[in-house]
Amino acid sequence: MAIAKNTVCLWFDKDAEAAARFYAETFPNSSLNAIHRAPSDYPSGKAGDVLTVDFTVLGIPCIGLNGGTTFRHSEAFSFQIATDDQVETDRYWSAIVGNGGEESVCGWCKDRWGISWQITPRVLTEAMAAGGAEAKRAFEAMLDMKKIDVATIEAARRG
């Protein structure tokens, strides 16, 4: 397997492998590609522990690093997933939140490892790109939501 020129590196306490397996099972065009074990003891682990995991999320190459508790995830980084309809929106939202994650607002949620996700129906993105009154109505409708409701956004777009 060729090494990607640019790879997202995600810091985990010790659960990079579990996170990568979850992402591979949840999203299409996703996979767990390789597990690399520590060749010797290190500050947050022992020789033989899973140190890094190579995986892909929706075609994006990632490395999960089991680095210990030094750093935590924040909303400053998120995966934004464009969905085509309510069924797809519900499926991803339920998978993330239902697997120990938590809801936030405006289409944002966190998985159980603290990674932030924006589950964003294309209808919302298209409304925002349209600008003007249509964007304003869709934006204001979104502000009252946790998971995005496609029908409500479509109604807001129409006025």
Image (cartoon, rainbow, N blue to C red):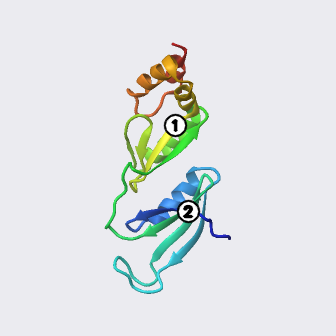
Residue 98 or 113: which is nearer the viewer? Answer: 113
The residue sitting at 52% across, 56% down in the picture is 22
- Label 2, on which residue? 7
The residue sitting at 47% across, 31% down in the picture is 148
- Label 1, on which residue? 120
- Secondary structure type for disc 1: strand
Amino acid type, label 1: Thr
The picture places residue 43, in percent across and down from the top left corner, at 34, 79
Q: In the displayed structure, does residue 55 sit left or right of residue 99?
A: right
Residue 48 or 127: which is nearer the viewer? Answer: 127
Quadrant placement of the N terminus: bottom right
| 126 shown above or below 40 | above
| 126 shown above or below 133 | below
Residue 102 or 98: which is nearer the viewer? Answer: 102
The residue sitting at 44% across, 78% down in the picture is 49
Give the residue at the far front of this rendering. Answer: 132
Q: Residues within 10 Å of mark 1 (few under 14, many from 20)?
A: many
Amino acid type, label 2: Thr
Between label 2 and label 1, give the one nearer the viewer.
Answer: 2
The picture places residue 127, in percent across and down from the top left corner, at 54, 25
The residue sitting at 38% across, 26% down in the picture is 144
Q: Distance between the residues labelled 2 and 1?
A: 23 Å
User: How many tags in the picture?
Assistant: 2
The picture places residue 51, in percent across and down from the top left corner, at 46, 75
Q: Residues within 10 Å of mark 2 (few under 14, many from 20)?
A: some
The picture places residue 74, in percent across and down from the top left corner, at 36, 52
Task: Point out which mark residue 130 bears.
Answer: none
- Secondary structure type for disc 2: loop
